[in-house]
Image (tube, grey):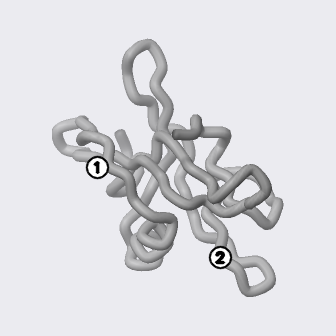
Amino acid sequence: MGDWGKYAVTHVRYWDDEDDRLKHVKRRGIDVEDREVGDPEVTRRRSVLLDLRSGNGYATAVKEDGKLKLREPVSVVESDGTEWLRAEGEEPEDHLGGLPTF
């Protein structure tokens, strides 16, 4: 699985249709040695930001052919004093590559 980090983000939830900030994500723990991912759990956006600042890596992941495929590493990008979760794109918003919502 490579150096993808500690968690895989599979789904996202925004505050509302007009807000660019995530409210929650569904994540799964990554066990690199066993090449397995854990059960999904819902966590707040703030927890993801804190984890990333503490060195716990995240990657986006999607299900293809019945298997979870890791896509892009997630990073924290600051713009005008606001921190954003980003896997791709350059706009000042949370953007994790078009993951499904829940």
Question: For residue 100, what is the image quadrant?
Answer: top right
Q: Residue at x 74, y 62 (%)?
A: 93
The local crowd at label 2, few if under 14, some if 14 to 19, many if 20 or more residues have their Cα within 10 Å, is some
Of 98 and 16, nearer the camera is 16
C-alpha gap between disc 1 and disc 2: 23 Å
Above or below — where is 49 with respect to 66? below
Position of the N terminus, as image quadrant, is top left
| Amino acid type, callout 1 | Gly
Residue 47 image position (x, y, % from top left): 42, 70
User: Does residue 41 appear in this view?
Assistant: yes
Horizontal placement of 27 versus 33: left or right?
A: right
Horizontal placement of 33 versus 40: left or right?
A: left
Disc number for residue 42:
none
Question: For residue 82, what is the image quadrant?
Answer: bottom right
Above or below — where is 51 with respect to 27? below
Residue 2 image position (x, y, % from top left): 37, 45
The residue labelled by disc 2 is 83
Q: Residue at x 67, y 63 (%)?
A: 21
| Amino acid type, callout 2 | Glu
The residue labelled by disc 1 is 29
Whichever of callouts 1 and 2 sits on the residue coming sooner in the sequence is 1
Seen as rendered, the residue at the extreme bottom is: 81
The local crowd at label 1, few if under 14, some if 14 to 19, many if 20 or more residues have their Cα within 10 Å, is some
User: Does residue 3 appear in this view?
Assistant: no
Seen as rendered, the residue at the extreme front is: 16
SS type, badge 2: strand
SS type, badge 1: strand
